Amino acid sequence: MPTLVSVNVGLPRDVSWNGEVVHTGVWKSPVAGRVMVRRLNIDGDGQGDLGGHGGEQRAVLVYQLDAYRHWEAFLERPPMEYGSFGENFTVDGLPDDEVCVGDRFRIGEALLEVTQPRVTCYRVGIRMREPRMPSLLVAHRRPGFYCRVIEEGTVAAGDAITKESAGGGMTVADVDALLYLPDADRDAIRRAAAMPALSPGWRRSFEAMLATREDTRGNAGLTKVPGERPAWTGFREVRVRDTRQESPSVRSFVFEAVDGEPLPPARGGQFVVLRIDRPVPLPPLIRSYSLSDGSSPGVYRISVKRGGGDGSRFLHASVDVGHVLAISAPRGDFVLGDDVSPVVFWSAGIGITPLLGMLHDLVLRTGARPRDVFWVHGTRSGEENLFVAEIAGLLSRTGTARRLLAFSRPGPDDRAGRDYDVDGHLDVAALRRAGIPLDASFYLCGPAAFMSAARDQLQAAGVPASRIASELFGGVEALRPGIAARHDVAPHPPADESATGVSVSFVRSGLTVRWNERYPNLLALAEACDVPVRWSCRSGVCHNCETALVGGGVDYAPEPLQPAAEGNVLICCSRPRGDVQLDL
């Protein structure tokens, strides 16, 4: 009969790791006597990152004595202390390839139900002093599993474990493999998604996998798979066909292909990456810019605000009609949805550019799929109010449209009611007063602080997150589980930048640096540059670090368990093969 060998608990602690401080509850130690198991936790236990661990669906983590023996042999380790894998219950019996999701077990006074496999992250690697551990747990099909507490009660080492009811017939190891290993069977994914005991997060992952085409490379259950492949890889030469000064600080550039072949259609909201060659010995500038119009056949338009960066300064000062530079194919998933619900385009400052591209797209579709349109924009004054005539013309062609403009510092010639509607900044209350419906689909773009506030206000007003889309200029929103967020450090070259390595461009961050062979992977280089990054496992399992590869190629070491989506790379386990450009 299966037996509870050890009960292990531990409160979160701060641990030094790679020059950072990690707040983690992965250190568990055996406790004697009977311990109370409650709905959300075991007495004396805690989790450092409640976003990835703990909660009702993950109240108790279980790991097997047989797995301990396996890892002791594989890693050539002496017998390890119970709790070394961060588990609450060390059990003799209940192997992952026999226990099923939905099985219910009586342990002492408590009744537990299996809800999901363990989601492995880098912290188990820290605890085990083996960075590969997150990947190894999955590859060796020994992840362990979480339970929710059906009946609270006390447990103690030595308690017998009895199975009270069977679950959905799919083992923990099989469910884990469906998400993390390649060549998953879609019928099996469908059965897994239908298991009522499976935690909601895992069900959503399997539903996302089923919603993608069977031949799609990449795993939509782990990360957002690009909806469309870029029209070309790398860079293509284009010529500046026209320029226009939109305001004292914003200038537009219209590009056409040098080779005479029309540029393929782009979707409103997408962006392109520019490679701007400069006089030797200056290196090329690699920058990304949203398309303000991709609807004109064969050409693209970007609109650039002159700022403190080298890219915008060079474009404003040195690029004119006839200038040749290189661009990537349009990319990005911040595009207009296909539904016919009312749509609110809400922007601030230069964030107007991708939304203007969407408005062009919408006008092209209006004849077949009319939508109510609300154009909401905030800027400093009439002098900085961009594309006034163009937007008015487009809105007049949508059928039902309404405009709401706010000037934060109106000029002496600006008149309320004529040139603008709100003196100051816009918020949800202003949208309500203007009669803008909150059951619409919202598209947001502008400075990070604006988008964060707008999103928070909309969700507080009851707008579901699924109906709020946004585009963040600059780097991605960082994910560094267990490590405090950093907002005060701008991306910069690493302290030990090589003078001879290949170039690595973080295009959203506007940074190009030289690769140094001392870094184990591109993720480590990005961190050395304080480029915002997302990660969790750091070993090619979770795909949180998956990043679009604008140009160049990489080599993997180690190989990830599943390949990234086409056109993407996993930066946690890859190194540049030559010059590379990453969408970071």
Image: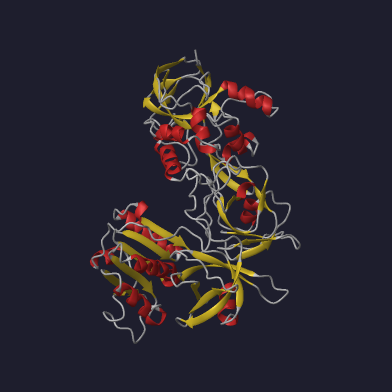
Q: Residue furthest bottom?
A: 413
How many numbered discs? 0
Its colouring scheme is secondary structure
**Residue at image point 36% right, 26% down:** 150
The image quadrant where one finds the C terminus is bottom right
Q: Residue furthest top?
A: 1
Question: In the image, residue 535 lies at what x, y percent?
Answer: 55, 48
**Residue at image point 60% right, 33% down:** 139
Q: Work out whether residue 401 or residue 340 is closer to the camera in this orientation and state it.
A: 340
Question: In the image, residue 68 lies at what x, y percent?
Answer: 61, 24
Residue 342, compared with residue 55, is above or below; it is: below
Residue 513, compared with residue 316, is above or below; it is: above
Question: In the image, residue 272 lies at what x, y percent?
Answer: 53, 66
**Residue at image point 63% right, 22% down:** 69
Q: Quadrant of residue 540?
A: top right
Residue 87 visible to an observer of this rendering = yes
Q: Quadrant of residue 355?
A: bottom left
Question: In the image, residue 414 lies at what x, y percent?
Answer: 33, 84
Q: Would you say 112 lies left or right of 474 here?
A: left
Q: Residue furthest right?
A: 500
Q: Work out whether residue 212 or residue 555 is closer to the camera in this orientation and state it.
A: 212
Q: Would you say 247 lies left or right of 256 here?
A: left
